[in-house]
């Protein structure tokens, strides 16, 4: 994982922390927020989710209505009373206080609920409501800002829990139909549909490090959808809706949303349950892909992770890895080491560096193969503990676009 560089119009955490004290008046005036207790269900499409066929040529997949009936009661409406201390959209001003809303879903019948870390950031108290059940208090068992995931715990005796089955994000293909369920703008249990638009995206986590292998979808998701499930055609969770691209013109959906892969959550959740936090291995480099003009830049290979920055005092600096000093017109730093292999795994792109150490723990030693100029070298490196923030740090992975900060009154990371 790595720190990020400024650019783009991604609205970091744009789906979760709908700060009511700032935008409430605007949204209520627009008729967006319903202040009553009636539940609303918005279905964009009711046809077959997957026209494909399964084994033996038999039709596979379910209708949107069938998926909603199967999983809808497992989706949570989350409300958190938040205090200042987090990120502020305007430098120099305190972070907002008030009510934040988001989504989540039941993991099991013992009371564990998964959501985004930014939904419950700086939360003083949290409530969770499933379907028409009364809202119940929830405890934040653990948060991991590096993956933007959090685990909540409710008393299973106080509400009906209907866990949603987990799928396998590795099996997801571009073009696969998907269903999103959540609470955009306070409209609880809203259902939208779309497809998997792209895979292997990289987005910025709330602490500035990158989240890799992210699923891109055109299913309509908006502020308040954060933490809700992205479901496949069999009603299994393949991702956790977390961010949207705003296009620079507002804070609503423009058809480009991002979901954290469920395979990432499967690794993080057990640690959050047992320890309340996750220890991430750390190299301390920011990297970029080899450009198409790699030969013109006299690079020895046409794939790998080109080091852009080495964090002071990091494992990478101690191992002698170097960043370049020459910046091209498009912002690429050249002249640095080019990583081509980490812990025995070939590196084709920056995200592969993160993947190579994803299952490692701080203190473990790995070998890194790289080119310095046209000479290939190998160093042994002892992985460190990732800092809490990427500010001034390198992470050891890709260099994603910097999510756009929310405007005053709009969702924050």
Image (tube, helix red, strand yellow):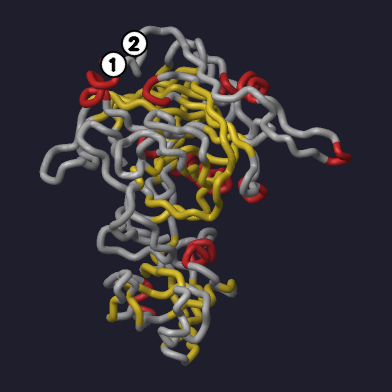
Q: Position of residue 179 (x, y in %)?
A: 58, 32
- Which part of the image, by quadrant, shows the C terminus? top left
**Foreground disc of the pair 2, 1:** 1
- As drawn, 338 above or below 390: below
Residue linked to disc 1: 28
Dot 2 or dot 1, earlier in sequence? 1
Residue at (27% x, 44% y) in the render: 405
Residue at (31% x, 29% y) in the render: 18
- Please identify the quarter of the rendering in which residue 275 is found: top left
Is residue 163 at least partly visible in the picture?
yes
Q: Position of residue 70 (x, y in %)?
A: 65, 22
58 relative to 177 in the view: left or right: right
- Please identify the quarter of the rendering in which residue 299 is found: bottom left
Q: Position of residue 160 (x, y in %)?
A: 56, 15
Residue linked to disc 2: 35
Is residue 385 at least partly visible in the picture?
no
* Secondary element at tag 1: helix
Image marks 2 and 1: residues in contact by CB distance under 8 Å: yes
Looking at the image, the residue that sits furthest to the left is 92
Looking at the image, the residue that sits furthest to the right is 56
């Amino acid at each position: 994982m790595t720190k990020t560089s400024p650019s783009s119009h991604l609205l970091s955490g744009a789906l979760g922390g709908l700060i009511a004290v700032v935008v409430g008046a605007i949204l209520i005036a627009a008729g967006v927020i319903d202040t009553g207790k009636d539940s609303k269900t918005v279905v964009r499409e009711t046809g077959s989710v997957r026209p494909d066929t399964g084994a033996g040529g038999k039709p596979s997949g379910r209708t949107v209505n069938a998926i909603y009936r199967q999983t809808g009661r497992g989706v949570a409406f989350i409300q958190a009373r938040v205090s200042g201390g987090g990120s502020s959209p305007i430098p120099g001003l305190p972070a907002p206080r008030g009510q934040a809303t988001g989504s989540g879903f039941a993991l099991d019948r013992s009371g564990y609920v998964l959501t985004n870390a930014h939904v419950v950031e700086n939360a003083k108290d949290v409530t969770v409501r499933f379907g028409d059940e009364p809202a119940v208090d929830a405890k934040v068992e653990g948060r991991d800002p590096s993956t933007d995931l959090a685990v909540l715990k409710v008393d299973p005796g106080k509400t009906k829990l209907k866990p949603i089955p987990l799928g396998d994000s590795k099996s997801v293909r571009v073009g696969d139909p998907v269903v999103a369920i959540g609470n955009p703008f306070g409209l609880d249990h809203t259902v939208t549909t779309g497809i998997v638009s792209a895979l292997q995206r990289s987005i910025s986590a709330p602490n500035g490090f990158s989240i890799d292998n992210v699923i891109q979808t055109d299913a309509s998701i908006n502020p308040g959808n954060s933490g809700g499930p992205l479901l496949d055609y069999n009603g299994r969770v393949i991702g956790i809706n977390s961010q949207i691209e705003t296009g620079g013109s507002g804070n609503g959906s423009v058809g480009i949303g991002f979901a954290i892969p469920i395979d990432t959550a499967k690794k993080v959740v057990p640690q959050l349950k047992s320890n309340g936090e996750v220890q991430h291995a750390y190299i301390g480099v920011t990297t970029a892909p080899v450009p198409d003009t790699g030969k013109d830049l006299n690079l020895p290979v046409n794939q790998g992770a080109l080091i852009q920055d080495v964090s002071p005092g990091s494992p990478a600096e101690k191992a002698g890895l170097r960043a370049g000093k020459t910046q091209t017109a498009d912002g690429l730093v050249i002249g640095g080491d080019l990583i081509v292999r980490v812990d025995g795994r070939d590196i084709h792109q920056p995200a592969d560096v993160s993947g190579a150490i994803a299952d490692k723990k701080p203190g473990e030693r790995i070998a890194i193969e790289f080119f310095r100029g046209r000479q290939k070298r190998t160093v042994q490196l002892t992985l460190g503990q990732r800092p809490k923030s990427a500010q001034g740090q390198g992470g050891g992975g890709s260099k994603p676009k910097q999510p756009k900060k929310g405007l005053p009154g709009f969702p924050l990371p």
